[in-house]
Image (tube, rainbow, N blue to C red):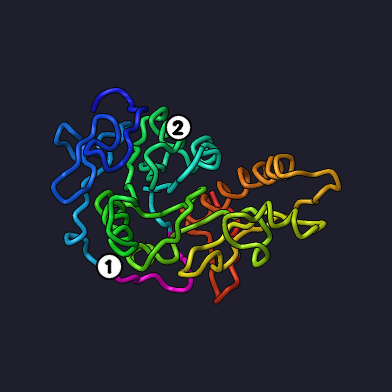
Amino acid sequence: MGAPLSGCFPVGDGLGVLGRRRSPDGILVPSDGSDGSDRGSRAVLGLHTDSVRRVRSGASDSVTRSMGERVAVLVSGSGTNLQALLDDPICGPRIVLVLSDRPDARALERAEARGIEALVVDASSFEDRDAFDHAVADALRRRGIDVVVAAGYLRLLGPAVLAGYGGRILNVHPSLLPAFPGTHAVADALAHGVKVTGVTVMLVDEGLDTGPIVLQEAIEVHEDDDWDSLEARVHEVEHRLLPEATTALVEGRLRVDGRRVTIEPVHR
């Protein structure tokens, strides 16, 4: 694959992302006919949903061994949490895929800068959520992914992904869950006049920010805070907690008992 791609045509014009073509089934694929798997390149793959195999989870309630060396990070935006993972000495070398639902996500550029495969599975190219979910699951399976981290990924993961990776998916959220779930947590905290908010890292389940909590840290809300000032402090905490939780997961140090999660100490 050539140099990183930065342009984007509107979806639906037959071209999609610059350097890509639309296949007969309406999915964006690399114009050179490759599968887009070259490290350090960006691709918008043609993922045929009828080829996706449903994988049933064999994970137990207790995570008792290393989760593996291949980590995928799911993104939708600028990728500051992705950058924190890339800069972490344990997490960074294990990241082999950055997958986005949006072709214009700046996080894709961060992946390319590190020579990591940047893959777009464009949600607008699929008939429904189920087809999109199967496409994401198939992309992860084809690349032998062991652990999935949602870092600013603005979509609920569906049954196909959860079946293949249940107990191996982390998400970070800008509030002290169960308070303020959803995509407007910082604004909601300010609107409710809370004195304390925070950050939560959780294992992903089928609900909206409802999975077992791995890590939390409180953040004081100042009287003069606005969205920008509070979000900046939230990001600082996110950038610490998400690599910490991801490291524990890939090293097999998470113990899950119902909704209670503990992290075992490091033994090196």
Q: Is residue 63 magenta?
A: yes
Q: Which residues are magenta?
A: 55-65
Residue 117 coordinates in the image, percent (x, y): 33, 37
Q: Is residue 71 magenta?
A: no
**Where does the N terminus fall, quadrant-wise?**
top left
Q: What residue is drawn where x is 53% and y is 48%?
A: 268
Residue 32 coordinates in the image, percent (x, y): 16, 31
Query: Closer to the camera, 168 or 98?
Result: 98
- Disc 1 marks a residue whose amino acid type is Val
Instruction: Name the quadrant containing residue 119.
Output: top left
Question: What residue is disc 1 on?
Answer: 55
Q: What residue is drawn where x is 53% and y is 54%?
A: 248
The residues tagged by marks 1 and 2 sit, at their Cα atoms, a distance apart of: 30 Å
Numbered badge on residue 115: none
- Disc 2 marks a residue whose amino acid type is Arg
Query: Closer to the camera, 232 or 92?
Result: 232
Query: In this image, 230 relative to 185: left or right?
Result: right
Q: Residue furthest bottom?
A: 258
Question: What residue is disc 2 on?
Answer: 110
Q: Residues within 10 Å of mark 1 (few under 14, many from 20)?
A: some
